[in-house]
Image (cartoon, rainbow, N blue to C red):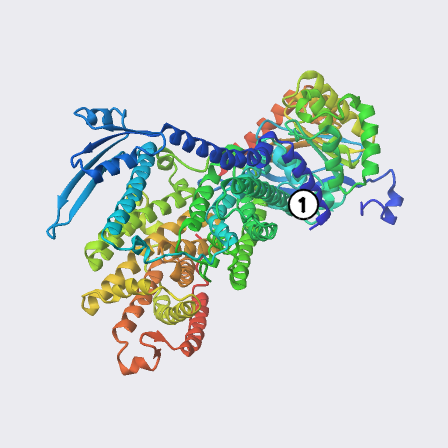
Amino acid sequence: MNSKKVMIVYRKELLEVLRDKRTLFTTLLLPVILYPLLIVGFNAIMTRQTGILEEQGATVAVQDSVQNAISMKLISGLSQIENFTILPAGANSQELYIAKDIQSIVTIRDSVRADGLKTYHVYIQYDAANERGNLTYTKLSGNIAETQKEILAEELEQSGINPELMNIVDVRKRDTADSQKKMGMLLGMFLPYIMIIMLLTGASVVAADLVAGEKERKTLETLLVAGVGRKEVVIGKYLTIISLGMLNLVVNLFSISFSLRYMLSQSGLDMSGASMPLKAIFILLAAMLPLATLFAAILLSISTFSRNMKEARTYEQPIMMVSMIMAMISFLPAIEMSNLMALIPVVNIALLFKAVMINDYQISHLVITIVSTVILDVLAIWATIRLFNTEGILFRSDDDGGSIKGIKKNKASFFNSYNGLVYYTLALLLLYYLGSYLQKADLGKGLVQTQILIIALPVLLILRFLKLKSNEVLRLKTPKLKEMLIIPFIAIPASIVVAILSQLINVIYPFPEKYLEILGELFKMDLPLWGSFLVVAVAPGICEELLFRGFMLRFFEKYGVKISIVLSGLMFAAFHLDPFRFAPVFLLGMLLAYLTLRSGSIVNAMIHHTMNNGFAVFVMSFAGSKYLQIFLQDGENLKYWVAAPALLILSLAIYYFHKITGENECVE
Amino acid sequence: MEPCQFHPLSLLFVGIKREYMISVSNLVKEFPKKDGSKFFAVDDVSFEARDGEIVCLLGVNGAGKTTTMRILSTVFKPSSGTANIQGWDICKNPEKVRENLGFLSGDTGLYNRLRVHEFIRYFGRLYTMEDKVINSRMEEMAELLDMHDFMDKKIEFLSTGMKQKVSIVRSIIHDPPVMIFDEPTSGLDILTARNIVAFIRSCKERGKCVLFSTHIMREAERLADRVVMIHKGKILADGTLDELRAETNQSDLDDIFVHFVNNFTGEIEVQAHEF
């Protein structure tokens, strides 16, 4: 790669972008105007409105049913309130109140308690859904409390008791948080959200223009035949997006910082000494940089994939929505940074940001955040370069999706990646909503229903509807005897390896107790052994395989065997809606896809899947047996050394499987 | 640069045999169709072009002209076969190929927000030219094409004719020995189109090797030294106009083209019959 050419591309893109009025408006002008307007303007209006309310005062009708010295004193106290008009209540008081001519009705009653003491009851009727009503209530109740104190002091004095007795307990507060930290907490809550959204907005405006825009304006071909490689073009454009995102961020941060400083100096709060220190701003910018690179890479790949800018903006929307929701985590009070949180993109930056603002962060979190973001980043940029080298995508013109009419006419066209993703999303939603509903009443029955009704049945119905041969599409054919015989030697060791991997993950990222409880329920169902085996092993073994290795694999065939296998693993893992088991399930999914594609028969994968789940049932049920105890530690965990023979048998078995399936075609 | 030009032995053949600037051999480009089958946009295409020669790739829309040219300009990779530009292989040395190639098409877009001189300089720099060289070349060409009035203007404010001139300068800023024009006059008004035609002629006069594609017979007749006819991805005929006339006993290029197309489809029918 020629870095000089990258810089030439970068400089030109930057120049062009900065000449675009829309970009200039959203990245520079908008933040400069927005925050002063929002913070300072809003603050000024608030103060002014409160002043107006104060001046308006209130008209209060008083119903005095007691009419003695004390009630008189209470009423005369009320009439001392500035801008308040006190009227005696009449028959039409309620009407006046409803017409908002008076803001409150105060009723004074008395009663005598069992011990002979006379008590006074003051009822304040007001409209809490109205600011004027709230202000009136605050003033009235405050005034009554004051008068009450005076009355009490008089009474005590008359009884010959020192009125100072009322202050016998003196409560004082001492706040250890300095104003800087308080401000940090406040900013730490809402700044990450604003910053992440701003970064994304700034970057997305540019990203859509950079490749999809070039396609639309027919300049891309000119650039591709010029003296520059595609990698250099991608990197140059990528740097442009990062720069604009960061520029947007810097402008926003400074604009917020200045507006806040102005607001605080006006407010006279105990935070007035605080400001946003320059150092914090730089740390924040540094923390946002990895996120900027990640967003840039994702947005650039979207832009490359899209036919025109409109399409790019449409595809950007889901990214925006997901990031917004993830960034909102900074608003949640109890969530704090941990090693696990540091792995989740966007969330990690939001929490790190929050921690930096109150100056309470760990270097390990910072490192995990940056490293995990950079890894994702490299993957995304690699994908973009690949897209850039894919002619079909760079010069995409015709429609990829298909109407039902079109599908029926041309059946094979149903199996494209777009339809695959749509079906997958629908199935996921169905599982999430209907599945959890089914399992609520009876877990065992619900699980089987989920497998059959949500996972397997729709696949069979769709194939029926499209009049496709289910056996062929789903690769439902009897495998060779040799293949079936070797499967247990793959399935059992693979289950062991995956289980140990799971245990290792548990050590680094301990599973929450609650989660283990839920998982444990699966194996504590009130079923005989053969029942659990049917529910946990056989049903998923057949149904999930029909969906993932039978149906879903067909959608992504055109990307080749390797990518199909990886995609199958990813989808399978994500389908389990379980971040803790993601890695093990991913590996299992890839292995199952390999077995299916290699042998051309899904039955192998079904046997493997059933044995894999059955293995877990077996270990759980016989954990107490002394023979099994040789391999177990801490209850149901496998001993780590078991992994070694398991890996050995697994590799040998896969090698043998690969050999005996050699004559089969990998992709039909 | 240009490794093939100065082989010592080639001195012996000066004026007798000259290197082909463009040589295409057995080029195939297939695209996957929705139903899983393959579509051959370019099917076993071979031809050559020397310097100082204008070769026209003639064919109806969808014949495979643009795909061929995109492969030659390294935008697409061939499915099989290969081609050399100025001795450089399009698959092995795409960067070198692009350095030796000027590419212009009728619907080329420009960066509207750049000024004309910025736009040209950008492409010059991408060819790793020195700013000094770019400036003097730009000056020379602005003079030649009468562009001085709008060198400082933003491209979005230019007329179609002005834009076409900018595109021309962009395509030859690095003084490439080989020029490829893909439907250079499509979508242009008659005056702008004439400018392009004049420009193609001047390339030949400067000794460059020119390959241009068109579906307009008249244009081919007026410009081409040699015509390569392409239909459904396959080469129908390759020769000078006189040779083609002699072969078909037709004088009009329209008729010659139809003759070859009929021959071609006839062949297919015969083949189908034999099966």
Q: Is residue B216 above or below residue A566?
A: above
Q: Residue at x 48, y 40 (%)?
A: A316
User: To which residue does mark 1 refer?
Assistant: A229
Give the quadrant of residue B203. top right
User: Left or right of A522: which side holds A327?
Assistant: right
User: Left or right of A357: which side holds B16?
Assistant: right
Of the residues shown, which amino acid type is indicated by label 1? Gly
Pinpoint residue A259: horizontal percent, then vertical percent: 55, 39
**Mark 1: secondary structure:** loop
* Chain under disc 1: A
The residue nearer to you, when weighing B49 against A213, is: A213
Residue A634 visible (yes or no)? yes
Q: Is residue A287 above or below residue A625?
A: above
The residue nearer to you, when weighing A118 against A271, is: A118
Pinpoint residue B148: horizontal percent, then vertical percent: 79, 23
User: Left or right of A558: which side holds A16?
Assistant: right
Residue A393 visible (yes or no)? no
In the displayed image of the protein, which residue is found farthest to the top?
B190
Q: Is residue A644 above or below residue B86?
A: below
Give the quadrant of residue A50. top left
The residue nearer to you, when weighing A360 against A198, is: A360
In the displayed image of the protein, which residue is found farthest to the right?
B12
Q: Is residue A20 above or below residue A329?
A: above
User: Left or right of B131: which side holds A558?
Assistant: left
Pinpoint residue A336: horizontal percent, then vertical percent: 43, 58
The residue nearer to you, when weighing A389 against A69, is: A69
Q: Classify mark 1: residues with Cα within 10 Å, few (<14), some (14-19) or many (20+).
A: some
Pinpoint residue A107: horizontal percent, then vertical percent: 20, 35
Q: Residue at x 17, y 35 (%)?
A: A67
Please give the count of numbered marks on the rendered protein.
1
